[in-house]
Amino acid sequence: MSQTTEQPTPPTDAAPENARRLLVLIGVVVGVIVLSLVTGAFAAVAFVLAIIASVLIHEGGHFLAARKAGMKATEYFVGFGPRLWSIRKGETEYGVKAIPAGGYVKILGMSSMEKGIDPADEPRTYRRATYPRKLAVTAAGVVMHFVIAFVLLMVVWTLVGVPNGDKPLLEIGSISKLKSGPSPAEQAGFKLGDTIVSVDGRAIASWKELPPYIRARPGQTITFVVDRDGQRVTLEATPVNGNPKGEKVGFIGIGAKTEIERVNPIVAVGRSAQDVGQLTVGSVKALGSFFAPGSLKDYGNQITGSQKSDPDARPISVVGVTRIANQVGLFDFFALLIMLNVFFGVFNAVPLPPLDGGHVALATYERLRSRKGKRYEADVAKLMPLTAAVLLVLVVLGASTVLLDIVRPVASPFR
């Protein structure tokens, strides 16, 4: 939710220019989609659009809650910066801005510092609302991310299907190809339907044992024994580096054949709720562990390159997640989107300004300080240094993760 100054309504004679900008915008979107189809990056573009949609739904939660609470929402925009296109419906201006880095909803009176509000609109400002209504508006964005995750999980459980990892299937269900030529799996002679018996003389009980073993041995020949139509066949494969711009990670290009489980919608409700709960706990733990002193030191070493560290033990940016999304199947695509939405929800709930959790904390503090019908209003100016510090941390973290994802990208966890 933004606290920027409200922009005036575009004059009537700006309508032709506004229409022209809309056509250009539509042309750009169509062009990007066509280019993505031609270059094979359609999944990446779809993932970016899905993230933008998640942000819009987040802001839509704030918007609908504000409207329900009787507050005045004057803007609902995709992106930031200069306006590309906008249209006014009622008291709200909807539109698109030049920098596609999220979106925002402008609600009048989000702080006591906001000036220039028409006295007639003052009763409809956020700052004049009751505590329950403030809580509903500020928490709505966070809630929407969990709703998105739940709905996507329902789609996965009922339509896409979930690989049943409880059964240790060792049958090869996919063999990858490389753009540069045959993959190590193709060169070694693996075939679909081969069942892995042993690796380097070690019996294999579960497919889960394979990826870590292969990832740790780039450039080292691995001997596989497979069962092919009742006969034992020995194959040798040398993993190539699956992460050429960062820490070496072995990759040969075989995937397990898994049984796909689908359930009816009633069962899916329970499983989706359980999954959201587990992912929430995992996100909280991951967020807490990253900001531990040891993790921050390790992350600093990765940025400076001063010390060797695990490249996978760090947060990744939208750039890195999008790159991975372009390499995986439908289930993993949904899994990434679900995990990202749960993390967005958890992160936004952190009780620090300017995050939604910060607004909730401030509203709660004001409610606790109010006495005998006398409303207490916190001096938001005193929070500006903290807000600036949090924004600085977010900017530095965002920029550094993007840089690392470009220079030393994390290998896909789904290989």
Image (cartoon, rainbow, N blue to C red):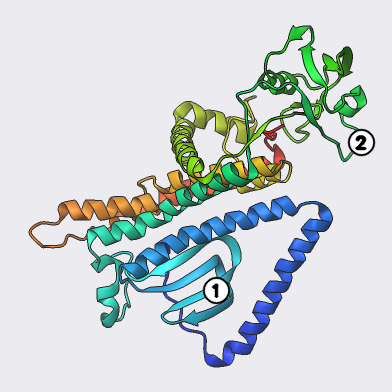
Q: x, y percentage for residue 212? A: 68, 21
Task: Determine whether label 2 and label 1 are within 8 Å by CB.
Answer: no
Q: Is residue 403 visible?
A: no
Amino acid tagged 2? Gly
Q: Position of residue 192 (x, y in %)?
A: 84, 28
In the rendered image, the vertical position of residue 396 relative to residue 255, given as above or below: below
Three-letter residue code for mark 1: Gly
Measure the C-alpha gap from mark 2 to mark 1.
46 Å
Count the numbered circles shown: 2
Q: Which residue is tagged 1?
A: 95
Asked whether the viewer can see residue 70, the reply is yes
Q: Is residue 376 above or below residue 128?
A: above
- Which is more N-terminal, label 1 or label 2? 1
> Residue placed at 69% from the left, 42% from the top?
324
Residue 292 shown left or right of residue 163 in the figure? left
Determine whether, in the image, residue 376 is placed left or right of residue 317: left
User: Residue at coordinates 69% horizontally, 21% vertically from top-left?
Assistant: 207
Residue 181, label in figure: 2
Q: Position of residue 391 (x, y in %)?
A: 45, 51
Decide which of 136, 207 is in the foreground and name it: 207
Residue farthest to the top, as pictured: 201
Q: Position of residue 20 (x, y in %)?
A: 67, 83
The quadrant the C terminus occupies is top right
Based on the displayed image, in which of its 4 quarters is residue 5 positioned?
Answer: bottom left
